Amino acid sequence: MHTRFSLSRRPRLMLAAALAAASLLGGCASLFQPPVAPGEPEEQVLARLGAPTNVYQDGNTRLFEYAAGAFGQYQYMARIGPDHRLVSYEQVWTLQNFQAIRVKQDTKQDVLNRVGRPTEITRYARIPFEAWNYGFKESGVWNSQMTVYFNDEGIVQKVENGPDPRFDDSRFRF
């Protein structure tokens, strides 16, 4: 009797697992579609992407920032035009965007409008500037950290790239 119970229970468990897998795979189809498209109304962008982590004003355009969290290496910006429609939606932590930051010209707000908020804000002992660290996936491959240094007036003084210490395991090797 115990054997019969296990045999009849096993097909039900397999069916339940198959149904669960099918429902999960159904949600995956949306992963391969663009989340939003240029021209969509702002309300639709917010409905699909949710509330932004920050909103910045850049002239007559608003920027909706979508941060990936503490260990995220990508950050997205939805640019909303004056007509309240999506102009663009892009991943902004790229080498090209960081290289476009102008030393001795750009302000903190300029940097926020270009690449959004940093992963970390700190001051290093030997450097007299505030440092904004951006941990990003350089060229989609390397765990890198871009650091933007600001003087006390909030003007960019230096931009520097290096390995991301959050992913450096060399100190744990024996």
Image (cartoon, helix red, strand yellow):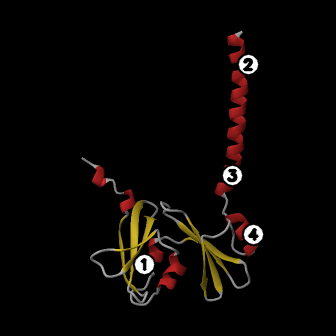
151 shown above or below 76: below
Under mark 4, the amino acid is Gln
* Left or right for 170, reference 39: left
Label located before the other in sequence (4 or 2): 2
Mark whose residue sits in front, 3 or 4: 4
| Residue that carries the numbered disc 4 in the rendered image | 44
Q: Report the number of discs.
A: 4
Front position in the image: 6 or 26: 6
Q: Residues within 10 Å of mark 1 (few under 14, many from 20)?
A: few
Which residue is disc 2 drawn over?
A: 8
Tell me the amino acid under the disc marked 3.
Ala
Q: For mark 4, does the 10 Å Cα neighbourhood hold few (<14), some (14 to 19), or many (20 or more) residues?
A: few
- Farthest left residue in view: 174
* Left or right: 82 as drawn, with respect to 135: right
Chain-order first, disc 1 or disc 2: 2
Looking at the image, is mark 4 or mark 1 earlier in the sequence?
Answer: 4
What whole-number distance in Å separates the C-alpha atoms at marks 1 and 2? 64 Å
Residue receiving disc 1: 99
- The answer to which of marks 1 and 3 sits earlier in the sequence is 3
Viewer-nearest of discs 2 and 3: 2
Whole-number angstrom distance, CA of label 4 to CA of label 2: 48 Å
Q: Nearer the viewer, residue 42 or 151?
A: 151
Instruction: Tell me where residue 7 sits by quadrant.
Output: top right
Q: Amino acid at mark 1?
A: Gln
Q: Would you call the spot at circle 3 few (<14 residues within 10 Å), some (14-19), or many (20 or more)?
A: few
Determine the residue positioned at 30% across, 79% down.
Answer: 127
Find disc 3 in the rendering and name its residue: 29
